[in-house]
Amino acid sequence: MVVKDKLANGARIITETLPESRSVSIGIWILAGSRNEAFEKQGISHLIEHMMFKGTEKRTAKQIAEAFDSIGGDVNAFTSKEYTCIFATVLDEHAGYAWEVLADMFLHSAFAEEELEREKKVIAEEIDMIEDTPDDVIHDYLHESTFKNHPLEQSILGTKDSVLHISREDLLAYREQYYTAERVVVSVAGNLSTSLSKNISDSLSELKKGSAIEGSFYSTFHPANTKVEKPSHQSHFCLGYPGLSIKDERLYSLSILENVLGGSMSSRLFQQVREERGLAYSIFSYHSTFIDNGLTVIYGGTNPDQLDEMEDIIQSIVFDLTKTGITEREMLQTKEQIKGQLILGLEHTSSRMQKNGRMELLDLPYQTPEDMVQKIEQVSLTDINLLAEHLLNNEPSRALIQPSNV
């Protein structure tokens, strides 16, 4: 059973009771991500996410870690382009204690100067690690070229320079502006008690209402080319085509299309590039969705001598999809695959919590797993093939990393 509650200050709670489960997953979702950041403060959302683990007014960073270790729980967090989430999964008997610690981290983080300076150095190392991993950083380069002069171009981690210059006052000001009641959702799934719901409501009542925030302007797809040289044995490249907003009803059609293109081992990209020709170990596609836009991405890595051949094959596959579409057999097979992945994935309380939290935060209509399966079933071959022509029959953005040592 799913219950929604909106508090007087605007904070929202969504709970899904699963009495057969022995676990409870709790997530605090905040509508603030890298697209909300000023250019010179890139990475501040991600830095705040890290700092929530670095001590509160009454707990040290070590005590926070020990709190979850002592109950056998998992605690983690992530930052995206549009939101931040801090979450934990614990045994049902420890759910109350887990919320107490999570709420303390969220509401009362100290942002101590010493911890802040140390964590900025940690994130600088994380940025270096990503920069040294071509098959990771290539996706940031694609966003930079596709969404030029828009906050969506910014890396979630920020740059080393921007992160190292963020002050404690910057963190406090950002939290004051964006960590307000109407921008917060708590999602809970599992074998939860009535007392837990009350404790969550009591904690969230501390949140202040915020003033209206002007959102970042509408993002537009701009095809562009980016080429970077790095020490590497392979060439790494991404092609980016227009995608769909998270609120677009055609997302189910896109999921099927993307899976046929390069989202599985039986996909056209995997079969023709890797299995038939042996040109790549890693070749795949995916789609990123945002509040107002989206991006359909193809990634591949290969020997520089084979790059032109692989790109030609990929362009041929894309062209074929825009002209003749996918087959009915591909559609039916992919529908079963997606349904299976969906249902199996939602057997975990953490997956339920994340699905519900994201939907509520982004004001999406609530859908049960059965609703989602029905939506998949309703997609027609015509729907998919019209979408393929609409999205893929465009000049793509390109990001390329070429070896500097060859």
Image (tube, rainbow, N blue to C red):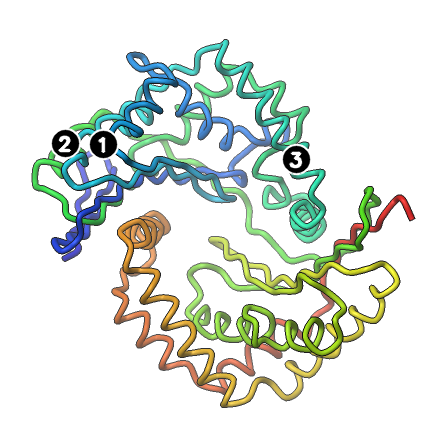
Residue visible at 44% across and 30% down in the picture: 49
Q: Is residue 202 above or below residue 317?
A: above
Residue 129 numbered mark, or none: 3
Secondary element under disc 2, as helix, strand or loop, is helix
Q: Pointer 1 and pointer 3: residues touching (CB < 8 Å)?
A: no
Q: Please, what is the three-letter code of the amino acid marked with disc 3?
A: Met
Residue 208 appears in view = no
SS class, disc 1: helix
**Looking at the picture, how far across and down is residue 381, in whole percent?**
49, 86
First in sequence: mark 2 or mark 3? Answer: 3
Quarter of the figure that contains the N terminus: bottom left
Q: Which residue is mark 2?
A: 199
- In the picture as drawn, the residue positioned furthest to the right comes out as 406
Mark 1–mark 2 Cα distance, whole angstroms, equals 8 Å
Q: Is residue 379 above or below residue 109?
A: below
Frontmost of labels 1 and 2 is: 1
Q: State which tag comes first along the sequence, 1 or 3.
A: 1
Tell us which disc is closer to us: 1 or 3: 3
Q: Is residue 165 visible?
A: yes
Determine which residue is flagged by label 1.
99
Q: Quadrant of residue 87?
A: top left
Mark 1 Cα-neighbour bin, 10 Å: few <14, some 14–19, many ≥20: many
- Binning the other alpha carbons within 10 Å of mark 2 as few (below 14), some (14 to 19) or many (20 upward) gives some
Structural crowding at the residue carrying mark 3, measured as other residues with C-alpha within 10 Å and reported as few (<14), some (14–19) or many (≥20): few
- Where, by quadrant of the figure, is residue 66 drawn? top left
